[in-house]
Image (tube, grey):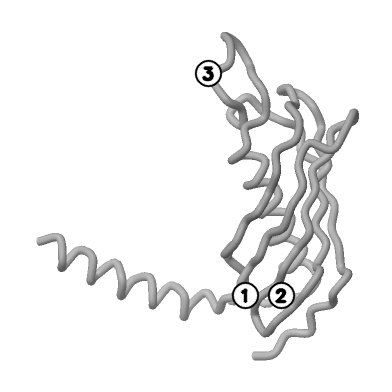
Amino acid sequence: MSFAINVGASKERSVRIQSFQTTSFLWEGENVLSTPSMISEMEETCRLLLKEQFLPLKEWDSVGTYVNVRHLAATPVGSDVAFNAKIISVESKRVLFEVRALDSVETIGDGKHERYIIHIPTFRERFMNKQRKLIKSSK
């Protein structure tokens, strides 16, 4: 299947930071947005951009394949963070995004993220085959 994905398409979404998205080692009590949680929200923003604008059929989606992100500043629980994603290149089913995260004070993260478009039934079948092989090899 061919996809008409437009370079330059973008999406912004706002997320209020929750305690489950924080580090737990800096000091007692609620801490700051963790790097893995920031990256997860960046990835989801990119995924939603593709689903909402270019992949409306239920059996098509995308998976993350590459992340190169800097975490630049700490953000406390309860803060609203704007996550921005912009498509900067498309090569067949590979889509590269520029990503950014900003709280109300400053940019807290930026970088690049790549996603690969998948046909869910085909992806699931490959996964199930691998799972069977792993189970068989562990016996």
The residue at 88%/33% (across/down) is: 106
Instruction: Give the quadrant of the N terminus.
Output: bottom right
The x and y percentages for residue 33 are 67, 30
- SS under mark 1: strand
Q: Which mark, by number, is residue 7?
A: none
Mark nearer the viewer, 3 or 1: 3
Q: Earlier in the sequence, mark 3 or mark 1?
A: 3
* Residue on which disc 2 sits: 55
Q: Earlier in the sequence, mark 3 or mark 2?
A: 3
The x and y percentages for residue 24 are 54, 21
The x and y percentages for residue 18 are 67, 28
* Residue on which disc 1 sits: 117
Residue 92 versus residue 123: which sits nearer the camera? 92
* Residue on which disc 3 sits: 25
The residue at 64%/67% (across/down) is: 115
Where, by quadrant of the figure, is residue 27 drawn? top right
How far separated are the C-alphas under marks 1 and 2? 9 Å
33 is higher (above) or lower (below) than 92 = above
Q: Which amino acid, mark 1?
A: Ile
- Mark 1 surroundings within 10 Å by alpha-carbon count, few (fewer than 14), some (14 through 19), many (20 or more): some
Q: Which amino acid, mark 2?
A: Leu
Q: Are marks 1 and 2 in contact (CB under 8 Å)?
A: yes
The residue at 77%/54% (across/down) is: 99
Where, by quadrant of the figure, is residue 54 drawn? bottom right
The x and y percentages for residue 28 are 57, 9
